[in-house]
Image (cartoon, rainbow, N blue to C red):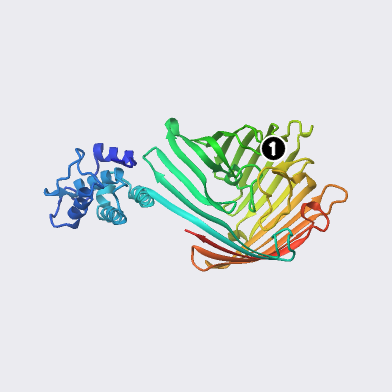
């Protein structure tokens, strides 16, 4: 029988504690009490076990202490392959009924509530969720920056996620979605709980260390937020977490074998200050040359609503260029609760010549402002970048936003890139939203006259 073996501490407390009992815990539960039928039904369906020997003596009177012990033990060994939503609701009702006795046993009811939430999440063993996204774009130019024609209806995202908790140590996750217009398996991996509190992912998984550090608020990260095939290991420690991975690709853009290695450590010194160090290397360029990048990032929270963040990046491009280009960014992140009427994301970036990023254009949320070269985005066309994003949440249904991008051209003959957006978002239901936005780009990639604008209506459903 496949069982979830959680709350070991709860079982130990139930079995061995010498508790200070609540008022009259040894009083028999009347034989006509609904709890007998509830536990009896759960036991008959094999959802829970009764006494430690696996039996349930439903025809014998039980004290409230014994019933509370059974409830706590049952929650620790629920068989989710057999449990239904009604079974979990019954367990919740039992917890409420015997709260005082559970407290007397030293079993914290709030922890049991958390356990019940986990049970609800894993009902039936499988969990499904997903996303649907449809864009209607009305651009100024056909074959311009935004669309292939002046009008474009684009179903650009449909994803079905699924996961199954195989046992107490193994979980399987997969994603089915659109790939080049076809439905395909895009993610599939297992999470394995190893000894010494180490977690391993194996398969086709995605990671995003820059998002974990809160280093971007627009389209994408610079180097992470990628799907890879290989092994990923992580281990928490008292002040933070260590992570590393190794991947292998036989079909990279150069058509040759490619290995990629990376490691990261993050220190949370206290609730206000953190530091992270990150390094990755591999055949990351289309010419299949060794490329490596390291970066250090920090964050300081002045309070719950004001934060200062930053990062310094350094690249080694092997024989592509002799220099080792660098970049740094500074971010002021202010929540709406601080200013009252709007949130504020203020980001300044300085680039060396030759600096590039691996993922999609960092500020290409609505249209391409970056300069793409092969499989990388060349940021070195700009000396520096200023990016501002404002969001105003008016209520649970309505919000508005504005964004502004300015990139100073590095080279003679180039023109400064400008991009600005205004939009409104409406939640028809908590799962269904409509977003209407106007976006305008001038001199995309610093190329003079590379301009366009668009009106975009986005329909999105999450479930």
Comparing 142 with 134, the one in front is 142
Task: Name the element at disc 1.
Answer: loop
Classify 23 as above or below 341.
above
Q: Tell whether 94 sits left or right of 375.
A: left
Q: Tell whether 140 sits left or right of 281.
A: right
Comparing 219 with 163, the one in front is 163
Q: Tell whether 62 sits left or right of 456.
A: left
Q: Tell whether 253 sits left or right of 13.
A: right
Q: Which residue is mark 1?
A: 285
Q: Residue at x 62, y 50 (%)?
A: 307
Image quadrant in which you'd find residue 191: top left
Looking at the picture, how far across and down is residue 206, in whole percent? 55, 43
Looking at the picture, how far across and down is residue 99, in whole percent? 27, 52
Q: Residue at x 80, y 52 (%)?
A: 446
Comparing 110 with 2, the one in front is 2
Classify 242 as above or below 332.
above
């Amino acid at each position: 029988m496949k069982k979830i073996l959680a709350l070991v501490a709860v079982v130990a407390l139930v079995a061995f504690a010498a508790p200070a009992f609540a008022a009259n815990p040894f009083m028999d539960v009347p034989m006509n009490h609904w709890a007998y039928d509830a536990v009896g039904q759960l036991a008959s369906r094999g959802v829970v076990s009764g006494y430690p020997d696996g039996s349930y003596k439903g025809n014998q009177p039980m004290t409230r202490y014994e019933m509370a012990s059974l409830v706590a033990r049952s929650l620790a060994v629920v068989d989710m392959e057999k449990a239904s939503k009604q079974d979990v609701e019954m367990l919740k009702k039992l917890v409420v009924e015997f709260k005082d006795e559970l407290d007397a046993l030293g079993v914290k009811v709030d922890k049991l509530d958390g356990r019940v939430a986990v049970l609800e999440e894993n009902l039936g063993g499988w969990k499904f969720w997903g996303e649907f996204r449809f864009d209607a774009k009305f651009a100024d130019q056909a074959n311009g920056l935004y669309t292939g024609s002046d009008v474009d209806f684009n179903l650009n995202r449909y994803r079905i996620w699924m996961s199954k908790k195989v046992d107490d140590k193994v979980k399987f996750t997969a994603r089915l979605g659109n790939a080049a217009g076809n439905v395909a398996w895009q993610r599939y991996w297992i999470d394995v709980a190893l000894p010494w509190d180490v977690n391993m992912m194996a398969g086709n998984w995605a990671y995003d260390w820059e998002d974990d550090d809160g280093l971007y608020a627009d389209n994408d990260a610079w180097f992470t937020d990628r799907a890879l095939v290989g092994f990923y290991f992580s281990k928490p420690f008292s002040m933070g977490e260590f992570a590393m991975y190794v991947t292998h690709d036989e079909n990279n853009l150069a058509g040759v074998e490619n290995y990629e290695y990376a490691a990261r450590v993050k220190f949370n010194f206290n609730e206000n200050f953190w530091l992270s160090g990150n390094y990755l290397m591999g055949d990351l360029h289309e010419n299949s040359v060794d490329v490596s990048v390291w970066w250090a990032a920090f964050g300081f929270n002045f309070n719950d609503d004001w934060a200062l963040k930053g990062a310094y990046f350094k690249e080694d491009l092997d024989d592509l260029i002799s220099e080792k280009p660098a970049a740094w960014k500074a971010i002021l992140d202010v929540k709406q609760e601080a200013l009252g009427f709007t949130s504020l994301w203020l980001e300044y970036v300085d680039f060396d010549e030759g600096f590039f990023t691996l993922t999609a254009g960092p500020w290409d949320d609505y249209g391409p402002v970056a300069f793409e070269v092969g499989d990388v985005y060349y940021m070195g066309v700009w000396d520096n970048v200023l990016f501002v994003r404002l969001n105003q949440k008016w209520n649970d249904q309505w919000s508005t936003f504005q964004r502004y991008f300015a990139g100073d051209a590095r080279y003679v003959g180039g023109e400064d890139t400008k991009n600005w957006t205004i939009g409104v978002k409406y939640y028809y239901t908590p799962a269904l939203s409509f977003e209407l936005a106007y976006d305008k780009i001038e001199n995309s990639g610093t190329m003079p006259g590379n301009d366009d604008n668009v009106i975009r209506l986005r329909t999105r459903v999450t479930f």
